[in-house]
Image (cartoon, helix red, strand yellow):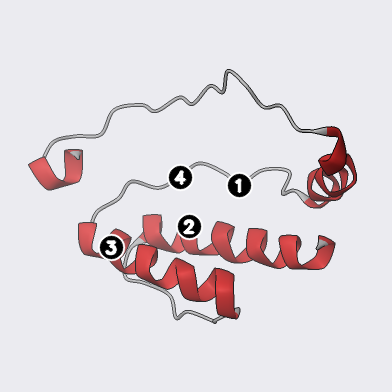
Amino acid sequence: MACELGLGLGSYHHFAASMHIYERHYAIASKIADAALDDVGETPALVQAESLHQLARDEVAIRTKGASIDPYNDAFANHCLRVITERSNELKSVA
């Protein structure tokens, strides 16, 4: 939103109130937790909104087809691309 309005970025903090899983999912949840990235690092600021729109379109191909996507001209989109690709590969290895 800030990028679209030409404003500076603020801070974002995410808190989850409920992270429950059901007993039938314990085994796969354990595998996912074991494979999780220790730290994805600080997320760069979004500079080009179009990069985010393209990333949203590409995410489907990454997740469903294992597509390899060329880097974007935006540090934020490249950060997200790395996380999406790594997570997708991790989930395939535990499925």
Would residue 92 appear left or right of 88 to someone viewing this image? right
Secondary structure type for disc 4: loop
Sequence-earlier tag: 1 or 3:
1
Extreme-top residue of the structure = 17
**Residue type beneath disc 2:** His
Identify residue for label 2: 79
The three-letter code of the residue at mark 1 reads Val
Using the rendered image of the protein, determine whether residue 48 is visible from the camera's viewpoint: no
Name the spot of residue 73 as percent of width and height, x first.
31, 70
**Amino acid at dot 4:** Thr
In terms of image quadrants, where is residue 7? top left
Say which residue label 3 marks: 53
Marks 2 & 4, CB-CB < 8 Å contact: yes
Distance of label 2 from label 3 (alpha carbons): 14 Å
Q: Amino acid at mark 3?
A: His
**Residue marked by disc 4:** 43
Say whether disc 4 or disc 3 marks the residue closer to the N-terminus: 4
Report if residue 68 is visible in the image. Answer: yes
User: First in sequence: mark 2 or mark 4?
Assistant: 4
Please identify, in this view, whether the residue under mark 1 or under mark 3 is nearer the observer: 3
Q: Are marks 1 and 4 in contact (CB under 8 Å)?
A: yes
- x then y, percent, for residue 35: 81, 52
Q: Which residue is mark 1?
A: 40
Q: CA distance from mark 2 to mark 1?
A: 9 Å
Give the residue drawn at x 56%, y 60%: 84
